[in-house]
Amino acid sequence: MQEYHLSPDELIAKDFRRIQSSCRGYHPYGKREWIAAIKKIDKKGGSVFAGDLQDKNPYLYNQGVWIFGNWDNALRAAGFNPVKMRMRSFWDKKRVISELRRMQRQNLPLYPDYVMENRHKLLSAALRQFGSWNKALLEANIIDHDVPRKTRLGLLRDLREAIESRSEISQALRSEIVYYFGSVRNAKVALKTDVRILSGWSKRKIIAVIAQRHRLSEKLDYTTGRRDFPALVSAAEAYFGSWGKALNAAGIDPNIYFVHNKWTHTR
């Protein structure tokens, strides 16, 4: 006040704070805007504890203290009880389970890499209280078996196959999808955006390519395939189990191209 000859109201005015700020991402909030920003963080499942804000959003914490006089006043202005907030700063088993179920309700992914990046304190507390992330999820009744071993890409392929075949998504697959993507809906969105899925093979694509080659009277025996279009043969073996099964799925009699041995479906 002595240095700039300004009143307290002028000191906290937006224009003055904007001029004085050199912090990247700094926003000169007013009282209402600051309250809205804090509530938005809490609504998204983020932490509004003083220590966490000082680490991740120091300017937001500093502004709260600056505008409202101290941190307790800032919390009260935003509708939080400072005493209860300090009591919640200790992560016990009950709070860990509560936060896990909250993430589940918000359809957020629950695999460790995501939690480490976005909720590292929750992950640390879960490991400390339960011994492992898997046990914490089991205690919260989020999963009823071991953590899925499939990769995200593998789950997307399984989901695509279920959709294309119009079969019901099994409970086991649904559980694994929720673990990695938060919800089946999120996984379906990933199907439309994941570059690996869009540019990769699928059963439908393999059948379409084989059928096209068959219409063009191209040779489809295994030896020719391995020499001329190995990527297609490898994908067919991965998705169908064998080249013969892929030909059969495309409506082509494999025996046309099996010269030395007769192919049967059971074989």
Image (tube, grey):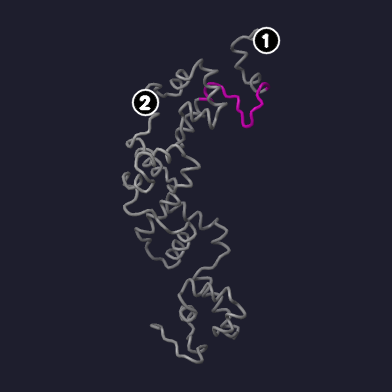
State which quarter of the image contains the C terminus. bottom left
Q: Which residue is mark 2?
A: 87
Up the image or down, 69 lies above or below 248; here it is above
**Which dot marks residue 3?**
1
Whole-angstrom CA distance, mark 2 to mark 1, is 40 Å
Most frequent secondary structure within the magenta stretch: loop
Residue drawn at the location 62% of the way across and 32% of the way down:
25
Give, as a single range, the part of the protein colored magenta: 19-34
Residue drawn at the location 36% of the way across and 38% of the way down:
96
Kind of residue at badge 1: Glu
Residue drawn at the location 51% of the way across and 91% of the way down:
259
Kind of residue at badge 2: Met
Mark 2 or 1 closer to N-term? 1
**Which dot marks residue 42?**
none
Residue drawn at the location 45% of the way across and 22% of the way down:
75
Label 2 vs label 1, nearer the camera? 2
**Residue 13 drawn at (x, y percent):** 61, 17
Residue situated furthest bottom in the rendering:
260
Assign a secondary structure to mark 2.
helix
**Residue 247 drawn at (x, y percent):** 49, 81
Is 199 on the left or on the right of 5, as rendered? left
**Residue 30 drawn at (x, y percent):** 56, 22
Residue 122 is a magenta residue: no
Up the image or down, 59 lies above or below 195; here it is above
